[in-house]
Image: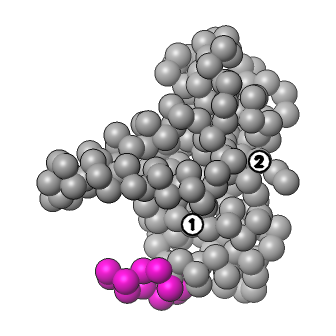
Amino acid sequence: MFAALLDTCTLWPSLQRDFLLSLAIEGLYRPLWSSAILAELEEHEARKLTKRGAAATEAQSRAVRLVERMQAEFDDACVQGWEPLDGSYGLPDADDEHLVAAAVVGGAGAIITDNVKHLPRNKVPEGIQVTKPAAFALETVELAPDMAMHAVTEMASRHKNPPRTADDLLALLENRYGMAEAVELMRAS
């Protein structure tokens, strides 16, 4: 199965994370991440929740639960042993070295990130694409639009506060995350 390393910036937006991980639950790809990615996600999620009005302790607790749920649902997603390769790729931003290291060790065919400029083609090993989330969503949805639509329907069933329909979620994916082409395929399925 195709494996893709999901950068923190891909996992941080809640709806985008839910959609991409729902596609993985449908078996359309295998998600990968590292302990460094999960630590960054936990930190940024706690900050986001605090900015939205949650008490600091509640925000931290919710961020920890998010990471724990991700690890439980995808118990083989966390790449182990990437640390010796960290810093060996000569990337423009040394803070992104862990992404390539984890992708190599995990056997990822792609790194999904909004920071594509930090991962220049000539610095990333052959066989690993660097792709933005919307492009990855399109490539993944193209594999099985009906399964992707099922993922969105399942997401809608979990949205209680506020309740959202599958159409609501498709509109958000299209308008907020620029996934118009993927949404068009799902609507046509």
Q: Secondary structure at mark 1?
A: helix
Residue 112 occupies quadrant: top right
Question: Can residue 164 be found in the magenta stretch?
Answer: yes
> Is residue 142 shown above or below 108?
below
> Is residue 84 shown above or below 146?
above
Estimate how packed mark 1 is, as few (under 14), some (14 to 19) or many (20 or more) residues with alpha carbons within 10 Å.
Answer: many
Which badge, 1 or 2, comes first in the chain's sequence? 2
Q: Residue at x 43, y 43 (%)?
A: 41
Residue at mark 1 to residue at mark 2: CA–CA distance: 16 Å
Residue 19 circle label = 1
Query: Label 2 sits on what residue type?
Result: Ala
Q: Residue at x 60, y 12 (%)?
A: 87
Which residue occupies the foreground of this view, 187 or 83?
83
Residue 19 occupies quadrant: bottom right
Question: Can residue 44 be found in the magenta stretch?
Answer: no
Residue 3 circle label = 2
Image coordinates for residue 111, horizontal then vertical, percent: 67, 40
Image coordinates for residue 172, horizontal then vertical, percent: 46, 73
Q: Residue at x 58, y 81 (%)?
A: 154
Name the magenta segment's main secondary structure. loop
Can residue 112 be seen at all in this image of the molecule?
no
> Is residue 69 shown above or below 79?
below
Question: Which region of the structure is painted magenta?
Answer: 157-167
Q: Secondary structure at mark 2?
A: strand
Which residue occupies the foreground of this view, 18 or 79?
79
Image coordinates for residue 168, horizontal then vertical, percent: 46, 83
Estimate how packed mark 2 is, as few (under 14), some (14 to 19) or many (20 or more) residues with alpha carbons within 10 Å.
Answer: some
